[in-house]
Image: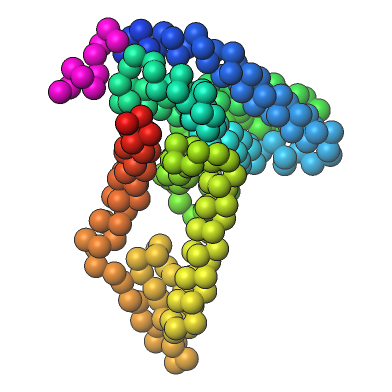
Amino acid sequence: MIAQLISPSRTFLFVRRYVFEYARVYGLLYLAIAAFLILWLGVHLNFTNPMLFSERVQVAYYFVTLFLAGCLSAGVLFSELGSKTRAIHYHLIPASSLEKFITSLLFGVFVFLVMCSAIFFAVDYVAVTIANYKYDTHWEVINLLSLNKYPNPFFDSPLNNMFCLYFPIQAVFLLCSVYFRKYGLFKAIVAMGLLWVVFIAIFLLFGKFLPVGMFSGGLGSYEVIEANGDNKLVSLSPWLVGAATIFFKFLLTPILWASAYFRLKEKEL
């Protein structure tokens, strides 16, 4: 059964074919990311604010680039399935659905992450060096392998937690590129917009019913503010918080990937 799904020799041949056929596509994608960063950081170099290249702002640049480029690339990863002729050609390739999906996941998610990070580091290094010379500052070029030592410009949490948000969102775009026959990227954007609206609506709805207070130490604990100053802390069970953390950090992304794979397999039947 496993040999039918994954054959080392067949997988190697498919990977080699995939690299040959998509080298130009990925090359253009990486060039587009580099051009975007050069233009973006180049414009910021023309401003007179030296804080635009502080470590905190560099981190923001990195994650904005990663989220935009990663989601856009995942949204078109299986775009060839939207064309009947190209879809037939794709399904006739002598490789199992699992081999095709794993190869696309390897190059579209993991290799992409490495390449996007390398491109950002190269452009950022040049931009920060020029900024330090221009503004007489001493900003450090951020180390992408040790992000937790920098402040998080988005949330009050370690920076590595941003990847726990990035991978599920990217997986949603990947799922939409497989699930929808046409316009998967745009439908993924609409889906994420609707999810965001639902999240905001639920948050506001809970705010109507909760007593006056604030979340302290995360969403697992809520401090009720009393008029007499005797505040009360309401906390969720630790096992419930732990289960939710494990689900969102480690299970949600694989579940979305598995859903995309089974949808790809259904299209091949």
Q: Quadrant of residue 8?
A: top left
The rendered magenta stretch, by its main secondary structure, is classed as: helix
Q: Relative to 41, does residue 248 appear above or below in the rendering?
A: below
* x and y percentages locating residue 194 in the rendered image: 54, 59
Is residue 142 rendered to the left or right of residue 105?
right
* x and y percentages locating residue 90 in the rendered image: 44, 21
Q: Quadrant of residue 99?
A: top left
Q: How many marks?
A: 0
Between 74 and 66, the one lying in front of the other is 74
Q: Residue at x 47, y 91 (%)?
A: 227
Between 68 and 82, the one lying in front of the other is 82
Residue 106 seen in this snapshot: no
Q: Residue at x 34, y 42 (%)?
A: 259
Q: Residue at x 46, y 32 (%)?
A: 146
Q: Relative to 171, does residue 201 appear above or below in the rendering?
A: below
Between 258 and 38, the one lying in front of the other is 258
Q: Where the N terminus falls, by quadrant?
A: top left
* x and y percentages locating residue 94 in the rendered image: 34, 14
* x and y percentages locating residue 69 in the rendered image: 59, 33
Q: Relative to 228, does residue 175 appear above or below in the rendering?
A: above
Residue 203 seen in this snapshot: yes
Query: Is 9 inside the magenta-drawn segment?
Result: yes
The colour scheme applied to this rendered structure is rainbow
Q: Relative to 237, does residue 18 appear above or below in the rendering?
A: above
Q: Which residues are magenta?
A: 1-10
Q: Residue at x 39, y 87 (%)?
A: 230
